[in-house]
Image (cartoon, rainbow, N blue to C red):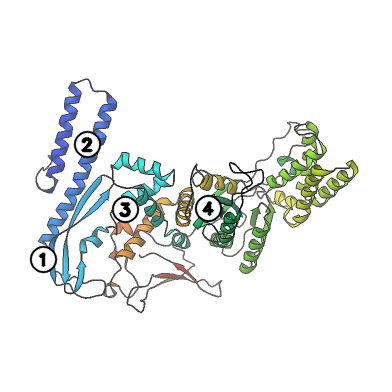
Amino acid sequence: MEPYDAWDASGPFAPAARAFDRLTSALSGAARGDSRHHEVELLIEAEGREVLRLLFQGFLDQREAREREESAREVRGGEGRLRPHREPGHHRSLACVFGTVTVGRVAWRGKPLGNVHPADAELSLPAGLHSHGLRRLAVLEAVRGSYDQAKAAIDRRCGKVMGKRQTEQLVVAAAGDIDSFYRQKIPLPATAATALVLQVDGKGIVMRPEALRPATLKAHLAKEPAMRTRLVPGEKPHRKRMATLACVFDADPAPRRPHDIIAPPTGRTGSRAPRPGPKARAKWLCGSVIHPPEHTIAAAFDQAEARDRDHARHWVVLVDGARHQLDLIAAEASRREVTVHVLLDIVHVSEYVWTAAHGFHQAGTAEAEAWVAGHLTTILHGQAARAAAEITTQAERDGLRGAKRQAADACVRYLTGHLDQLHYDTALAAGWPIATGAIEGACRHLIGDRLEITGARWGLTGAEAVLKLRALNDNGDFEEYWRYHLAREHERLYPPRPAQIPPHGLAGDLLPPELHPFELPHRPSVPRLAIAGFSDSGQPLNPIVVVTDERYENPRALPRPVH
């Protein structure tokens, strides 16, 4: 067996070597005693983290010593003015996942100009105290549970390096590049036969009073509670702000018949198993509580157009029947000149039918179940108007009165008011989905499991950040986004000077290689041209990529990170 390399215990890594020796000595003593395995685990966790912190500190100290020994070089500030004097010994703290370390660097000075620290850009240090690794950990923990739970998890792993308020602020900052990230991300293509499905829904989030929409805040302030200790049935506290969520996914056609959805009134014979429905793949979620619903619907249409630029696929839009959503979807489809097939969620339709059934038959009986099965089968055959007429005729024949007649009339109004969105016969024959399970599940997961935890009251920026980050994580894009976010953050903190920008635009070699692995996927049929410019103040503008295609009359501009 080859011997291990000896550890050089001199120089900046000497403290880490001594800490490692102390840990090995403690473990040797524990091996000779009666220590339990969990006690040894805790020892290694605590002392091992200190070894890692000292290793990181040794790296920073070694780098500082090398910077002190460097020969003189030309250093200029962001405004382009020379800093001729160097002054070592400038330090700043950095809280990382191992603890807090000290970063030493050389300052370059020039009267009456501010100091420039080249090491900050070379290390891509953040503007604040917390390292990018610690920020990443804070985001991952905060979108899973409450901020108190996130802080407790960080304390257990890293020690006391971050407060609750700092965690909230870092989460908000981390979500700042999500919109631009998705604007430059090109989804995977699909065949023309694959259905392109869009689903939209809304869900309320309990907000602090200052974060409510004006109409809701006015109702909240003007509300006189009927009872002092609790709400009466039907009373609303007016404490929620509606968030709009959208889901876009691909679905391969899976043709079905009505009896694959609803069992016949007489029951299934068992001779043929129900055909399975279409499966969602490449699912993409987005949502917003700050922006109005039309903003989220436009974002869903943007994603759909990125998947189907030529509008060659069938676009299927599923909603729950909210009139304002239908109007916004129709307006967006008209603006983009795309044909969409709008369907109501069959589950919402069935709820209206079940409520009407309890006016004719006792709840929980086989007669009520058979009545619902018969009418839903008629609706699934594309004959919703016939079902509505039959319900009205039966209500008049049976002489329904009061709440029972109101339930039957509500079902009839719902069906007759949405006849254009009840063409289930076409949808089933084409193999499209007819239920909004994806977006309903997203509402429960993205909002219910985090934003509606007990006692939560949200501000606008915090709720928006958590909602977007949870959607990003559910899309499976977090790791790719985080690299993109770090590249954008580096670009914001350390913009290249005009003299550093080559003729073809912002150069990728101005960043550390690990911070800019982004490039738009190559499409031989889609030529592209990188463009960069400067503002009136001399600051470099964000580069864009102009994507042109002979099939389009106008070019399409996409934001693009450097490289």
User: Of tags 3 and 1, which is closer to the observer?
Assistant: 3
Q: Which residue is mark 2?
A: 47
For disc 2, the neighbor class at 10 Å (few under 14, some 14 to 19, many from 20) is: some
- Helix, strand or loop at disc 2? helix
Side of 47 relative to 442 (left or right): left
Q: Which residue is mark 4?
A: 284
Q: Earlier in the sequence, mark 1 or mark 2?
A: 2
- Helix, strand or loop at disc 3? helix
Q: Earlier in the sequence, mark 1 or mark 4?
A: 1
For disc 1, the neighbor class at 10 Å (few under 14, some 14 to 19, many from 20) is: few
Which kind of residue does numbered mark 1 sit on? Ser
**Residue 545: image x %, image y %?**
43, 69
Q: Earlier in the sequence, mark 3 or mark 4?
A: 3
Q: Which residue is mark 1?
A: 71
Q: Looking at the image, which residue is at 77% across and 35% down?
A: 369
Q: Which residue is mark 3?
A: 132
Q: Earlier in the sequence, mark 3 or mark 2?
A: 2
Which kind of residue does numbered mark 4 sit on? Trp
User: Of tags 3 and 4, which is closer to the observer?
Assistant: 3
Q: Quadrant of residue 559?
A: bottom left
CA gap, disc 1 and disc 2: 39 Å
Q: Earlier in the sequence, mark 3 or mark 1?
A: 1
Which kind of residue does numbered mark 2 sit on? Glu
